[in-house]
Structure formats: C-alpha cells, structure tokens
Image (cartoon, grey):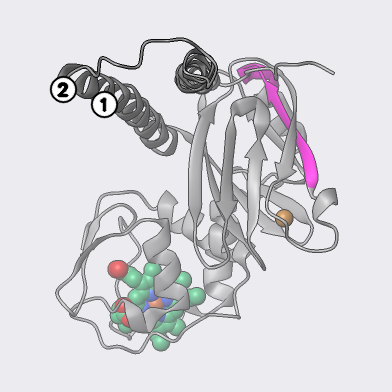
C-alpha cells in the first residue's frame, strides 16, 4: 500500500500542496496552543515556587499580533482554496466534452463521436476534458482520486468539472455518495492515453453515428421537427445557432442557451417560455431518457453558436 496517491492531473499537485500547507499550519497552531498549555501547567503548578506577585500590565501588542497572524494565515488558505475551486470548474476553451450518466449502479459514458462505454472512461492526456454529468435516479458522486476530483452527480441537472490528465495510466473511478445496496460496486476505471492512442481507441470503439447524428434522428422520432423544423407551419424557434447565444424569455429574463437551459426547455417548458412564441411546447419529462437528452443537446450544439434568426 502506497502512502501517497499518484497525482495524474494538471491540478492534482496543487491540491496536494494546498492540503500539505493546510496540515502544516494546523499542526503549528495546535503545537503552539498545546505547547503553551503544557508549559503553563508545569510552570504554575501548585507546588512550584514561582513568583506570582508581579502582575504585569496587559499589552495589546501580543493580542493583536496573534489575532492578525492567524487571520492572515487562515484567510489566505481560504482564498487559495477558493481560487483553486473556481479554476476546477471553469474549463479552458476548447475542452473535449464527454457525457456521463450515473445510474444504480453503473456509470454510462458517451463520447461526442457516439462511442459509449460503461464503468470505464477513456480520455486523452495533455488535453482538457470536461465532463457533463447527470443521474438517472439518485444522487451519485463521480470521483477520480488520482485527479483529485470528486463531484456530486444529481438527478435533474447537469454538473460539470474538468481535468487535464498529465500521466498516461489506468486510475480508479468511484461513486463516492452512498446510493443504495450495490453502491460499493459502482466503481470503474479511467484510462488516460496519449492523443494518437486515444484517437485509435475512438476509431476501434467507433459507432456509425456521432452523438449529434443520433440526436438529429431523435428530434424526428419525438416529433420536435414537426414544430421546430424549417418548413413547419408552427411558429417555433429554430435550433440553428441557438447553443451559447442569448435568449429572452417572455417574463423579460435573459438567459444563455447552455446545456442546462436546453434541458429545462425540453423537460420543463412552462418555466422558460421564449418571448414572441406561443406557449405550446409540451413537456417531455419522463418521455426522453437522460442519454437521449444528451444526444439532442449534442445535436443542437453542433448547429453552431451563431444565431441567424
Ligand atoms: C407543439 C410544438 C412543439 C414541439 C412538438 C416541440 N417544441 Fe420546442 N418549442 C416550441 C415553441 C413554440 C417554443 C417557444 C416557446 C417556448 O419556449 O415554449 C419552443 C421552445 C423550445 C426550445 C427553446 C428554444 C430557444 O430558442 O430558446 C427548445 C430547446 C426546444 N423547444 C426543444 C424542443 C425539443 C428537443 C422538442 C422535441 C423533444 C421540442 N422542442 C418539441 C414548440 C414545440
Ligand atoms: Cu452511486
């Protein structure tokens, strides 16, 4: 058993460093408090002949100094941790997006090219990867200890984080939220491979259709195109250039059409009605599965970020 876990992602060394500094500062503080306590217990014990007569004037200098010093130390640690946390959730532009759906008791992974896997996640090294995660049933937690990442995966919403794997290898993947009888079996592997090898893996795992192409088929199957299609007689917004662009709702609110927005439009259309259109879009909650939703979103994404209409 190794004492220290491999640090295999770009942010992992910094997380380790932060933990070490946090431990060091805590131990120093602890040592100071208990050291002084022990010293005073011994020095001023009942039998000691120490001079207790001269009560010195209280000085504010020491009081202020230790208060400020501990505040600076711990607030500094907080700022450092907060900054790291923010960076963990803000992917660099151009990150490869991979979708993860948690379910009792397995992890289903979908790559943009349509490749699917269960309880394994193949990723390229030296390239930022963003995971877009959701759950089909209860709360799970997608954790890759070697990347120093864990994040709850909740039903009904998308959670994301990103990483850049720096060392090729096979790493543990755990569900870290107790999620029912077989929670302990909800484990898997993350396989980080150099770019060209990853491309080869994609090819051999390849399906005939990309996620976006499957999404396009689903739009027909669920009848979305009947209203949203180019030649539809119904007045409904086009999906062209929708992704990432601003949308005005009929209550005056402005939104950016991201994954969450599109998901809610499909499942909870009453909550987000686009301004200038009749409120006729039905809810597809319970009709479209999480995996199919991700494909539909992938298709809408593939239609580009520039809104034409
Ligand atoms: C009965 C016609 C109809 C059907 C069927 C329909 N929609 Fe809609 N949809 C609309 C209308 C009208 C709007 C605009 C008003 C609103 O937001 O409810 C809309 C809005 C949307 C939006 C927000 C678009 C924007 O510009 O912000 C998305 C995304 C969307 N629909 C996706 C879908 C998907 C996916 C399906 C199929 C699963 C679907 N719709 C089926 C009529 C429809
Ligand atoms: Cu789980």
- Tell me which residue sits at (40%, 65%) in the image: 262
Q: Give the image location of residue 236, x and y in percent.
A: 31, 78
Please name whichever residue, 308 or 195, is drawn nearer the observer in this view of the structure.
Answer: 195
Please name whichever residue, 148 or 78, is drawn nearer the observer in this view of the structure.
Answer: 78
Q: Quadrant of the C terminus?
A: bottom left
Q: How many marks?
A: 2
| Circle 2 crowding by C-alpha within 10 Å: few under 14, some 14–19, many from 20 | few
Q: Which residue is mark 1?
A: 67
- Tell me which residue sits at (42%, 71%) in the image: 264
Quadrant of residue 89 within the rendered picture:
top left
Please name whichever residue, 175 or 270, is drawn nearer the observer in this view of the structure.
Answer: 175
N-term mark: 2 or 1: 2
Q: Give the image location of residue 194, x and y in percent.
A: 65, 17
| Residue 191 lies within the magenta run | yes
Relative to residue 243, is residue 22 drawn left or right? right
Where disc 2 sits, the SS reads helix
Q: Give the image location of residue 132, x and y in percent.
A: 53, 48
Q: Which residue is mark 2?
A: 60
Q: Quadrant of the N terminus?
A: top right
Q: Are marks 2 and 1 in contact (CB under 8 Å)?
A: no
> Can residue 196 be seen in this snapshot?
yes
Relative to residue 1, is residue 70 drawn left or right? left
Can you tell me whether the CB of the residue at mark 1 lies under 8 Å from the nearest atom of ligand 2?
no
Quadrant of residue 6 within the rendered picture:
top right
The region drawn magenta spans 187-197
Where disc 1 sits, the SS reads helix
Of the residues tagged 2 and 1, which is closer to the observer?
A: 2
> Can residue 229 be seen in this snapshot?
no
- Residue 124 - label: none
| Circle 1 crowding by C-alpha within 10 Å: few under 14, some 14–19, many from 20 | few
Quadrant of residue 192 within the rendered picture:
top right
- Ligand 1 positioned in quadrant: bottom left
């Amino acid at each position: 058993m190794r004492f220290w876990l491999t640090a295999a992602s770009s942010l992992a060394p910094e997380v380790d460093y932060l933990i070490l500094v946090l431990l060091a500062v805590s131990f120093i503080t602890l040592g100071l408090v208990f050291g002084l306590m022990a010293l005073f217990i011994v020095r001023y014990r009942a039998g000691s002949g120490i001079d207790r007569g001269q009560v010195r004037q209280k000085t504010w200098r020491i009081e202020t100094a230790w208060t400020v010093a501990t505040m600076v130390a711990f607030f500094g640690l907080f700022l450092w941790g907060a900054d790291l946390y923010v960076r963990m959730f803000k992917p660099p532009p151009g990150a490869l997006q991979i979708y993860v759906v948690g379910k009792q008791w397995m992890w289903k992974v979908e790559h943009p090219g349509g490749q699917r896997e269960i309880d394994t996640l193949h990723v390229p090294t030296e390239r930022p990867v963003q995971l877009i995660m959701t759950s089909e049933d209860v709360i799970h937690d997608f954790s890759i200890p070697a990347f120093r990442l864990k994040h709850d995966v909740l039903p009904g919403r998308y959670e994301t984080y990103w990483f850049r794997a720096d060392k090729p290898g096979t790493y543990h993947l755990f569900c870290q939220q107790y999620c029912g009888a077989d929670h302990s079996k909800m484990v898997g592997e993350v396989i980080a491979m150099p770019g060209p090898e990853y491309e080869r893996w994609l090819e051999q795992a390849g399906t005939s259709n990309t996620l976006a192409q499957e999404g396009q088929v689903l739009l027909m199957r669920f009848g979305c195109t009947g209203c949203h299609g180019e030649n539809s007689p119904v007045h409904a917004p086009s999906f062209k250039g929708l992704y990432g662009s601003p949308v005005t709702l009929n209550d005056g609110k402005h939104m950016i059409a991201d994954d969450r927005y599109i998901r809610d439009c499909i499942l909870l259309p009453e909550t987000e009605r686009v301004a200038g259109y009749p409120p006729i879009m039905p809810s597809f909650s319970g009709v479209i599965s999480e995996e199919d939703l991700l494909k539909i979103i992938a298709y809408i994404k593939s239609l580009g970020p520039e809104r034409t209409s």
